[in-house]
Each structure stands twice: as C-alpha cells, then as structure tokens.
Amino acid sequence: MSTPDTQMNGESLYLAEQRKQELKQLFPGVFTETRDNNGELVETLDYERLKAELGNFSEIYDNRRERYGMDWPGKRDCLRLIQEPSRATLKPCREESVDFDTTENLFIEGDNLEALKLLQKSYYGKVKMIYIDPPYNTGKEFIYPDNFSESLDTYLQYAGLKDNEGRTFSTNTANEGRFHTKWLNMMYPRLYLARNLLREDGVIFISIDDNEVENLRRMCDEIFGEENFIAQFIWEKRTNRENRKIVSTRHDYIVCYSRNTWESDKPISQLPMNDKALASYKNPDNDPRGSWKSDPATAQAGHGTKSQFYDLGGPNGKVHKLESGRCWLYTEKVMAQAIEENRIWFGKNGNGVPRVKTYLEAKERGLTPETIFFAEDVGTTEAAKNKIKELFGGIAAFETPKPVQLLQTLLKLSSNPGIVLDFFAGSGSLAEAVYEENITASRTRFVLVQLPEPCDEGSEAEKIGMATIADIAKERIRRAGNRIREKVTEQLDLNGLTGNDLGFKVLKLNQSNFKLWQAPSKDISDDELLQQMDLNVDHIDPNASQEDLLYELLIKAGVMPTEKVERIELSGHTVFSVAEGTLLMHLEDDIDQALIDVVLVKAPSQFICLDKAFHGNDQLKTNAVKTFEAFSQGKEKIDQIDFKTV
Ligand SMILES: C[S@@+](CC[C@H](N)C(=O)[O-])C[C@H]1O[C@@H](n2cnc3c(N)ncnc32)[C@H](O)[C@@H]1O
C-alpha cells in the first residue's frame, strides 16, 4: 500500500474524530453505548435522539433498540418543551431595583424555565459560572406546571398576574408513583437550557443530597457529557448530630461539570492559601529559601522505574530502606543532588524518615482544591441561617440558605468569573457572595432567578411583611449591599479602595407586550381566533410603558438587559440609545423623515421602531427601508444598519 493512501486515511480519520468531538460538544446526549456484533460495547450515535435535538420528534423512541442511557416517562416532552419558544417578557421594575441605570447585576422574578428561555439569545455562551441549589426532592417542596405546554399561563395565574382558570402548579409528594420522574422532568429542560449559557471555559456547580444525586449525575452525564465531570464535592453542612435519625447526615454534595474540558486546560482554579494551610509552612533549619513543609519522599511502587528502588544513605550514615510497595520519589542520582542542596528533611536529629521539602516560595502559591469542604472553612446551614437572621434584625427570614463563604469558595474555584448565574436563587446568597468577593477581587456580575413563591403562612418572614421568597431575596440583597457599602466606605478611608457595583436591576416575568408574539393556544375555536385577530389590529398592550417595550425588544434582539441605556433627543424625538449608540430604539407613536435622516448620521448597527409610528404611511416606510438599504450598500458590512419595525 502506498504512503499517500495511508496518510489520507489517517487525515480523514482524524477529521472524523474531530467532527465527532465537535458534535459531542454541541449535543453530548446524542452519543450512547450499544453492543456491536461481537457483543462489545461501542460508542454510537443515536440518530433518533439527534433528530429530536433538531426539532424532529416523529420517530423518536419508536422501534427503540436496547441502548445505554437514561430514559424516563416524559423525557420526550422535555425535549419538545426545550424547543418551544417563550411568549413571555421581562418587565423592568425600577422601584424594587438598586442603581437601576448603572448596575450590571440582574434579579429576575419568575419561573426559571421561562427565564432561561428568554436569556438564551442574550446570554448564549457568556456565563462563566452557574451555581444552583434546586429542590432536593424530599417531598412537597417543588412546584411546576402539571401540563408541560402551559408553563407560562400557569405561572401567570400562580403569580396572580392572570385570572385563575383552574390550572395549578403541583407539589411532588414521596408517595406518588412518579416521584423521581417528576423531578427529572422539572430539572432536565432547565439544565439543558442552562448549558447553552455557559462559556466554553464555564463550570456549573449543583447542590444536592442523597435523594437525587444518582439521577442528577446521570442526567448531567447526558447533558454536559461524562468527560466534563469535574468532581462531586462533599460539603459538611452541620457539625451537630441529628439524634432522631438512624444515621445522622452531615453533608450535602456539590456536583461540578465543566462546559468543555477539552477547550480549557484548567476549568477549576487553585484556591488561595488560607491561614490553616499557611500555618503548616515553617523554617526550623533556617533554610535560606524560606518556609517549607515536608511531604513523603516515596511513592507507590507501581509508579516507579527500576532506578527508583535503592537503599538511601542519610546524612548521619543511617541507611533507609523502602517499605514494601513503595519506591523513592526520585532516582538515586537526583536524590543525592537534593540531599546535597538540603532539600530533603531527615528530622531534627538527622535520623528521621526522609521527607521532601515543599517551599512556600511566594504567598500567591495556590492550594489544589480537595473534594471536601469543611464546615470550619466554609460554614454550615445553621451559621448561614444566623447570618440572615442578623441581617433581618433577629428574624429568621429564610430556613435553608447556603453559607456565603461556601459560595465565595465556588466563585474562587471558577477564578472569580465575569457573569455568574443562579436560577434557584432562594434568599439570594450568591448575590451576597459576589458583593463580598468584589470588595477585593474581580468585577463579577450576577444574574439571579427566583419564583415569587409565597412565604409560609405564619412564618417569621411573613410577619415582617415579606409576601414571597423573591421579596426576601431582594430585601436580603439590599441589606447585604448596604452593609458592604458601609464596610467598603470604611476601607476606602483606610486604603483608598474604589466603590463597587452593589446594585441590582429587577425584571419580572410577564406575558409579552406584543400580542403578535402571544401565539394562540392549539385548541382555540374559530370565533376566539377571529376575536384575537381583531384585538391584534393594535398589537401592543396599551398598558405597556416605553421602558417595558424597550426591555422586551432588547432581550428578543439578543442584547443583555444590563447594557447601558440612555434617552437621547434626536430631531425632536426621544430615542433610546443602547450600548453607546450601537442600537437605537424609537418607541414613540410618530416617526418622520427628519428622524430617519438623523439616525443615518448616527449610523447605529441596528435601528428599531414601532410599525404603528408610520400611521399607515406606506410611502414613508418604503422610503425608510430603501434609505437604510442604500446606506448599507454604500458601506463596509460592519457599518450596515439593520432596520426593524415591530
Ligand atoms: C433550596 S432553595 C435555594 C436556596 C439558596 N441557595 C440560598 O442560599 O438561599 C431553592 C429555591 O428555588 C426556588 N424555585 C423552585 N422552583 C423554581 C422555579 N421553577 N423557578 C425559580 N425558582 C424556583 C424555590 O422557591 C426555592 O426558594
């Protein structure tokens, strides 16, 4: 066989493997294991599943062969649900926000499935770290619509934004047959959509306990890819014993996956040295290289080469023999050199078991993270609850918060990232952790999503006027921000630290302000359809403010709702200028040629205005389209103006 043939084969094989990896990155769930003709397990592509991922469900799971993977009743509906676009919007709420116009932090009040769908365009591939603490499925604690296709309507009724027609969010009770299935159906679409938002070097951390950890791991293996599993951390959540239990559970898990381990050589960073770790570095022999700690000078025998098995002579002439099953860390020659350089420690009297010195060298030397987070380092549930109590003047406003230090540790592990997301925000602990980290470290921004779940009747939170858990979270973030502001101001006096973003913008899930985007339900009657069409003559909700429309259009145009927005005057009209004029939005009821001419001079990438602003003047509209087209043709592609009406 000639060499070129072989090379071509090699090349095509390599390309095929590369393409396979690319496909795997896009759709980790479409690869499965099947048995080949020899009965060997081989990795194969599940074509039906790939078709479903691309929106074709017709054949999925029909004529199914035996395959390795995770299936449960309702999974097919999950895939369908993922692809259904959202008919919702996020309404800005200035009154409940802090520093609305300048903050880059976001608090979304609403169901996280709808919220994740709405964020798909603007946050696609932009989130560095996701932390979630979802319901653990211990019974009666999570809510989601009974009917897959009605999630927005059910939410609107749940949140009191629409008359109730009898649809409900259901709780999951342990004696139900579909107990685990329901939890999987709730989690799968949310995790699937969340993955899309992660950056290539992003990571996700998920708190969970024994109830669902197995299901969660298998589901994440499918969604994120088994090869992207990083660790299943253990967090010591309590230090006291639960005496009424058969076995007292002292820990939760935090499961961690990366978006793409292939792309980022280190998806998880080292942790900064803490006092405990620093304390183990000493300098009993006044080594001029500075403080050191000692580590074993041997390794497992299986890891060694022939030259690592010898008798080692110590400085006092004592001969050190290897324990069975061990070899020396270095060859005899390298070891002799290390002893010569005083890098091996034989104890104070020089007769001890030889150990290798590891130098602190520089303080920034990091700690390799370990799979256990101890309570003394990151706090317990009880301590976290007490911290919230302190913030709320002695009121235990939230029962199950995670400690801020624990979340700060996770932020550090993901190297104090750009944008972080928590879509089961609870009392908003992640926001406080971000504020704390930002005092000394980078500029991390948060996006939190929390359902307006009513506070329990008679609960302490209800007694101080908190109607929902979202209210608790917002108040907690405000109070934490104020406390940190005071702390930072003190430090500012001391060492000139600059201020931080201690604000957050509140957006609330609601139905679209545009009737044309509120698709009629499938079982609508002809009369109802005609009625809806009549209503759509003016398709904009008359109660919607310009700012409501602005935010809906920003999100749907794929612009982050935290982008800088200014109101500017152009030719007698007020126009929204977004991201330093990259996008201009005119949301008044009137438009004229003079405004169009000024927009041309401003040359934004995109110009959006209301269709009704033309008042049926087709000539003006056609002229506008032509003018923008002509402008675009005369320019480099980068300078084109994308003109849209709604
Ligand atoms: C265990 S708590 C999170 C606690 C949080 N880590 C903290 O430190 O405060 C889970 C939260 O998820 C919220 N939740 C449940 N289903 C949700 C949904 N569909 N959308 C948004 N939030 C939801 C619940 O209201 C609950 O407050």
Image (spheres, rainbow, N blue to C red):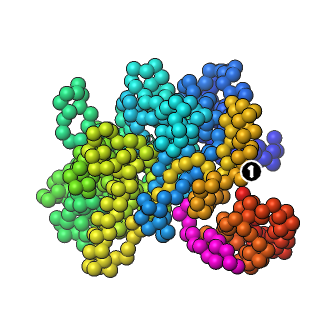
Question: Where is residue 339 shown, x and y percent of the image?
Answer: 27, 61
- Asked whether residue 387 is in view, the answer is no
Q: Is residue 522 left or right of residue 559?
A: right
Question: Where is residue 82 shown, x and y percent of the image?
Answer: 61, 39
Q: Is residue 156 left or right of residue 356?
A: right
Would residue 246 be counted in the magenta stretch?
Answer: no
Would residue 573 be counted in the magenta stretch?
Answer: yes
Camera-nearest residue between 269 and 361 = 269
Question: Where is residue 583 shown, x and y percent of the image?
Answer: 66, 68
Ligand 1 is within 8 Å of the C-beta of the residue at disc 1: no
Specify the amino acid type for callout 1. Answer: Val
- Residue 409 to residue 42: above or below: below
Residue 477 lies in quadrant = bottom left
Question: Could you tell me which residue is drawn at 63 percent across and 55 percent down?
Answer: 542
Q: Quadrant of the image for the C terminus?
A: bottom right
Q: Quadrant of the image for the N terminus?
A: top right
- Residue 210 to residue 596: above or below: above
Camera-nearest residue between 343 and 109 = 109
- Residue 257 to residue 564: above or below: above
Question: Could you tell me which residue is drawn at 38 percent across and 51 percent down?
Answer: 471
Residue 287 lies in quadrant = bottom left
Q: Which residue is mark 1?
A: 537
Regarding ligand 1, which quadrant of the image does it lie in? Answer: top left
Camera-nearest residue between 45 and 189 = 189
Residue range corresponding to the magenta coloring: 560-576
Question: Could you tell me which residue is drawn at 66 percent across and 65 percent down?
Answer: 587
* Badge count: 1
Question: Could you tell me which residue is drawn at 47 percent across and 43 percent down?
Answer: 159
Q: Secondary structure at mark 1?
A: loop
Classify 10 Å Cα crowding around label 1: few (below 14), some (14-19), many (20 and above): few
Question: Where is residue 55 shown, x and y percent of the image?
Answer: 70, 37
- Asked whether residue 627 is in view, the answer is yes
